[in-house]
Image (cartoon, rainbow, N blue to C red):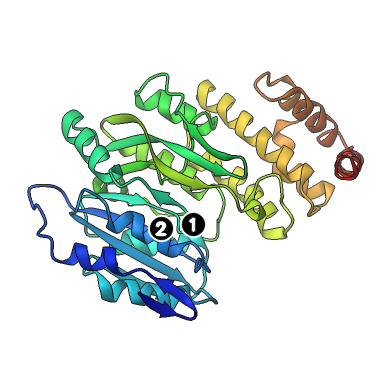
Amino acid sequence: MFIVNDTFINTRSFRSMNSNNYSFSNPLVSIIVPVFNSAGTLERCVNSIITQTYKNFELLLIDDGSTDCSAKLCDQFCSLDKRIKCFHKPNGGVSSARQLGIENAKGEFWIHVDSDDWIENTMLYELIEESKRTSADIVMCDFYNENSAGSDKEVLDISSLSKDLILKQLICQEIPGALWNKLVHRHCYLDTKVNFPLGLDFGEDTLTSILLVKNSNKIAYVSNALYHYDNLDFGNSLTHLSNAKAVHDRIKLIKIFPEYIDINESVNKNAYYLYSGKMAYDVVAADYQITQSEFDDAFGHGRSFYHRINRLPIHYRLVLYFATHNAYYGIRALLRLIKKIKNVG
């Protein structure tokens, strides 16, 4: 047991792993973990990784300028297991941290894990085995959504494993664009030099997943929930947008999204408008307010479409119709009044 800035680290798992010989007949997996002020959850995350039944991996901890004791914890973990590598950088956001990770990854396969989440101890084994069995260069899996009500298993609604349909489902958010439930062969990153959109801290994984799927040859799916997504921190929830960065990230995401897809294809275009409508509603409902002109500049393209997208909830369509027809401030005031009444009740 170690103590770093009053944080206890259980070293039993680290000691037990260092003496094991790796099986070099199996591919090296690079696990990239961006870290920012994660002292309260980092040990749980790291312990779930170093106790994997699949041993041939490297763990890259990317400290993104943490102001708590996370940086010291990363160094401590690194000293206890030779498979752990630690990198420190000035704070630049999650995209820059992920980028530094892929620039230093040595594995044949890469996967990302968020520092407040954790993984099942068979995750790497099951994904690697499925890749071997199917010769897939991307393998996806189900996950658990950890929330205040408990643990909910989220099963991917995959209609087909063809690239075109997976792309459509990614754009429509029918399957999560997150990178943490996807084991990806390094060639999918390197063939077209896939980089993370720097400065974007929301949706960067979806944009990157789209490029990786485009570069893939075959996609496989493991129907087991192997990842635990900690959804207890409502501060970053889509429905709690209280700061300028969160709102402007969504605006930037929608503006650059067409660069990642062929917007002229009807399937992609319809999927884009659906995704754009969801982002537009989040911005209208956010605590932080932009101006009518800023809203029109970002979402005016949906003026003739949002209210006709049947896959958007009816209240989304009504809100967006008024917001895109010169009633942005009025509909925002109405939403805030409804929210206030609900809070009182």
Tell which residue pokes out farthest to the bottom in this image.
Answer: 5
Label 1 crowd (10 A; few <14 / some 14-19 / many >=20) = many
Q: Position of residue 134 (x, y in %)?
A: 20, 28
Q: CA distance from mark 2 to mark 1?
A: 6 Å
- The picture places residue 293, in percent across and down from the top left corner, at 81, 48
Quickly name the residue at label 2: 45
Q: Is residue 123 left or right of residue 336?
A: left
Q: Position of residue 123 (x, y in %)?
A: 30, 43
Q: Position of residue 78 (x, y in %)?
A: 30, 73
Q: Is residue 337 above or below residue 38?
A: above
Is residue 183 found left or right of 267 in the rendered image? left
Q: Quadrant of the C terminus?
A: top right
User: What residue is rendered at 48% in x and 35% in y?
Assistant: 261
Depicted 164 relative to depicted 55: above or below: above
**Residue at image coords 40%, 25%:** 164
In front: 94, or 152?
A: 152
Q: Nearer the viewer, residue 19 or 332?
A: 19
What amino acid does circle 2 point to?
Cys
Q: Residues within 10 Å of mark 2 (few under 14, many from 20)?
A: some
Q: Is residue 89 visible?
A: no
Q: How many marks?
A: 2
- Under tag 2, what secondary structure? helix
**Precedes in sequence: disc 2 or disc 1:** 2
**Residue type at numbered disc 1:** Asp
Question: Which residue is located at x 52 percent, y 28 percent?
Answer: 174
Q: Nearer the viewer, residue 191 or 152?
A: 152
Disc 1: which residue: 116
Return the mark for residue 331.
Answer: none
Q: Determine which quarter of the picture holds residue 275.
A: top right
Q: Given contact means CB atoms under 8 Å apart, are the residues at marks 2 and 1 in contact?
A: yes
Q: Secondary structure at mark 1?
A: loop
Taking the image as drawn, is residue 120 in sight? Answer: yes
